[in-house]
Amino acid sequence: MLVENLYKKNTHSWMVMGRDPDKRQEVIDTNQYLIQNNGRGLLLDPGGIENFAVVAAEFSKHFELANVEAIFASHQDPDVISSLALWIQTNPKLVVYVPKIWVSFISHFGVKEENMRPIPDEGGTITLGGHDLEVIPQHYLHSSGCLSLYDPDAKILFSGDIGAALLPDDNTDMFVTDFDEHTKTMEYFHRRWMPSNSAKLRWIAEIRKRDVEMICPQHGSIFKGDDVAKFLTWFENLDVGSAWSGVR
Ligand SMILES: [Fe+2]
Ligand SMILES: [Fe+2]
């Protein structure tokens, strides 16, 4: 697994882990993120059950896992949080922020309701070590209950499956290097998995109100600098919900 520091200022930092060369062929490659502030940790979309041992071992080289106090799940998919029950075994007091409409479904991953902190449709704030993170609605992109997380100090946006790319195994770039080339690895995914153009435009308008230096998706490379605006424009112009020929 590759581990990279995305941001560091005083006691506040972001770290990403991904591109596991040893992952099984049939599972999707995922990025796991850890935000730290004042010694407290928040994991974003910690990944599938098959990934748990590798993710936990790798992050524990850089951060005391006992100090991970919470997990943020952008939505309910197994590649996002089927590892949840295992994380809670390592710390029974772990708090899991989930979109409210998914609480009863996520219980099927073996998580008790007492660990879950439902986030309402309109989003809200998560406080980590005295530092506020903003939760922004991302519904229908692609899940019917879906959330982004924005860190106003780091100027980093975690966008879940938005911006995801299915990259060939030999591509280990943590950041997008050639935007136009990169769109080829994103187009089908977004046209297939994102069902709503109106939800897409609403989300883009919300994100443009914020100062974003990095967009961090759950799959594929990270958008940085000029590529942030390029991605929003590309997504704006893409006709989503259109990949299946049966809808034409
Ligand atoms: Fe998903
Ligand atoms: Fe995903």
Image (spheres, grey):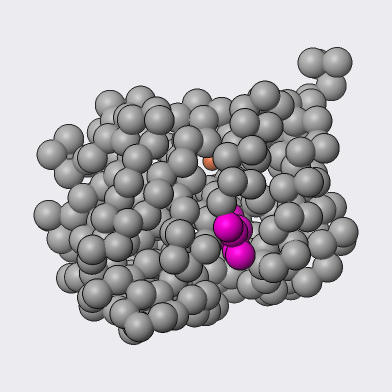
Q: Please state, as top left, top right, bottom left or bottom right, where the C terminus lies in the image.
A: top right
Q: Looking at the picture, tell me which residue is in the foreground, 135 or 27.
A: 135
Residue 13 in view (yes/no): yes
**Is residue 18 found left or right of 98 in the rendered image?**
right
Is residue 189 positioned above or below 230 on the image? Answer: above
Residue 106: % across, % down: 31, 35
Residue 210: % across, % down: 56, 51
- Give the total of numbered labels: 0
Residue 61: % across, % down: 34, 84
Q: Residue at x 54, y 68 (%)?
A: 18
Q: Residue at x 74, y 62 (%)?
A: 227
Is residue 197 positioned above or below 155 on the image? Answer: above
**Is residue 75 found left or right of 230 in the rendered image?**
left
Residue 68 in view (yes/no): no
The quarter of the picture where residue 213 lies is bottom right
Residue 29: % across, % down: 58, 59
Q: Is residue 199 magenta?
A: no
**Is residue 175 found left or right of 185 in the rendered image?**
left
* Magenta stretch in the rendered image: 211-217
Q: Looking at the picture, tell me which residue is in the foreground, 48 or 146.
A: 146
Q: Residue at x 53, y 48 (%)?
A: 160
**Is residue 220 found left or right of 123 in the rendered image?**
right
Q: Is residue 214 magenta?
A: yes
The quarter of the picture where residue 203 lies is top right
Q: Looking at the picture, tell me which residue is in the foreground, 185 or 202.
A: 202
Is residue 31 positioned above or below 10 on the image? Answer: above
Q: Residue at x 83, y 68 (%)?
A: 178
